[in-house]
Amino acid sequence: MEEIFKVPIRNLFVLLSYADNMPELINSMNAVDEDLITYDFICKQFLKEVEKVNRRGLVKDYVAIAEPTNRLAGRMVMEESMPYIISKKPMVVCEKDEYTANIWLNQLIKSTLKSITLNRYVKQETKAHSFKYMELMAEVDAPPLTKSSFAKMVFGRHNLHYKRVLQIALLLHEMTLLSHKNGNWSLFSAQLDEHSLNGIFEKFLLNFYKIEQKDYQVKGEGMQWKLEGNKAFLPGMRTDVSLIHKNKPEKIIIDAKFYKNIFQVHHGKSSFHSHNMYQLFTYLMHQEPELNLRGILIYPFNGSAVDEKYVWNERMTMEVVTLDLDGAWKDIYKKLISVLDRNC
């Protein structure tokens, strides 16, 4: 059974913005009182961006349209025309380019508007505004949204004004997927299972440290076992976040772990989860000998505040810390930055 964590919508918005490498969305919310950032508030921000797009006019492009016809026009599609030819019907399928607003960029917007109108977490006033904007896009289709629908977002000079509206659309879609999976949501908070939260948090930490500090190179790092023998059966090793100092022989390896209880209990004795400690220790033991090393396990705060440090030798330490995802974003930010500032 998955354990559940309660996360404010405002913090989930931040986590997803970093996880999807869209920090500009967070910067744009800096002047907003954190307590005002609800699910409905984010939908309203999306509608404001839709209004801007409508004022400038929907982007159009040429789209190939294929349809049966009794006269040749454009390019004949032989494969689709064959059933008509075989049955001796005076029809063929022709394809021609049509200049239209019914392109995928606009379809993403309209499909998001449609999802807002059907969402029980959205106020009636917000739904009404969404209906209004849908009516202004009558010629645009609204296909079902999937995560892959947003995978090909590329912005150039002609469609750069779509960037913010589609970024918010992506976040709303991801929140919708999570809400359908877990069900127990409100305008203000979401309940997420360990697995969902862990995947989001890994990406969040990676991109947070890539963006918010300049001293370290940041990446997820694959490593090879320093063992002789048949390595085909050895499990892979890959860190969630490796921070390699640009000017010093220092490295920090961070692993994000999500459990309802930060401690395991064996024969009445509480201890940190052994496999997490073993895994991180193994990562550290496979580093170059000249590096000063820190390994950090980050757990969500869930009633037990922890900040422990363990020393292996003068060049290597392991730490276990908790992060309160229910707290103010500014406090989460300070905690994550302060983790890097500690001495090895």
Image (cartoon, rainbow, N blue to C red):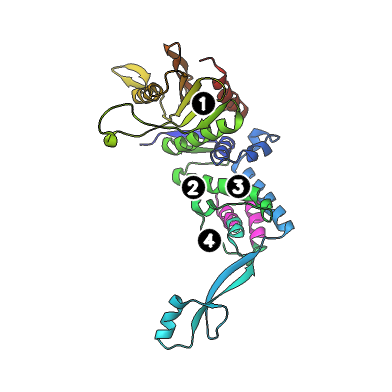
Q: Residue at x 50, y 50 (%)?
A: 147
Mark 2–mark 4 Cα distance, whole angstroms, equals 16 Å
Q: Residues within 10 Å of mark 3 (few under 14, many from 20)?
A: many
Magenta segment includes 301: no
Instruction: Assess whether mark 1 and mark 3 are in contact (beta carbons under 8 angstroms).
Output: no
Identify the mark nearer the N-term, 1 or 4. Answer: 4
Q: Residue at x 27, y 28 (%)?
A: 228
Please state which of the two labelled residues, at mark 3 or mark 4, is closer to the viewer.
3
Q: Residues within 10 Å of mark 2 (few under 14, many from 20)?
A: some
Name above or below for residue 311 compared with residue 182.
above
- Tag 2: amino acid: Leu
Q: Residues within 10 Å of mark 4 (few under 14, many from 20)?
A: some
Residue annotated with mark 1: 244
Give the SS element for disc 2.
helix
**Within the image, what quadrant is residue 239 found in?**
top left
Label drawn at residue 143: 4
- Tag 4: amino acid: Pro
Mark 2–mark 3 Cα distance, whole angstroms, equals 16 Å
Residue annotated with mark 2: 177
Residue 302 showing in the rendered view: no
Q: Position of residue 32 (x, y in %)?
A: 69, 36
Identify the mark nearer the N-term, 3 or 4. Answer: 4
Residue annotated with mark 3: 167
**Within the image, what quadrant is residue 39 found in?**
top right
Mark 3–mark 1 Cα distance, whole angstroms, equals 30 Å
Identify the mark nearer the N-term, 2 or 1. Answer: 2
Give the SS element for disc 4.
loop
Mark 3–mark 4 Cα distance, whole angstroms, equals 18 Å
Identify the mark nearer the N-term, 2 or 4. Answer: 4
Label drawn at residue 73: none
Q: Residues within 10 Å of mark 1 (few under 14, many from 20)?
A: some
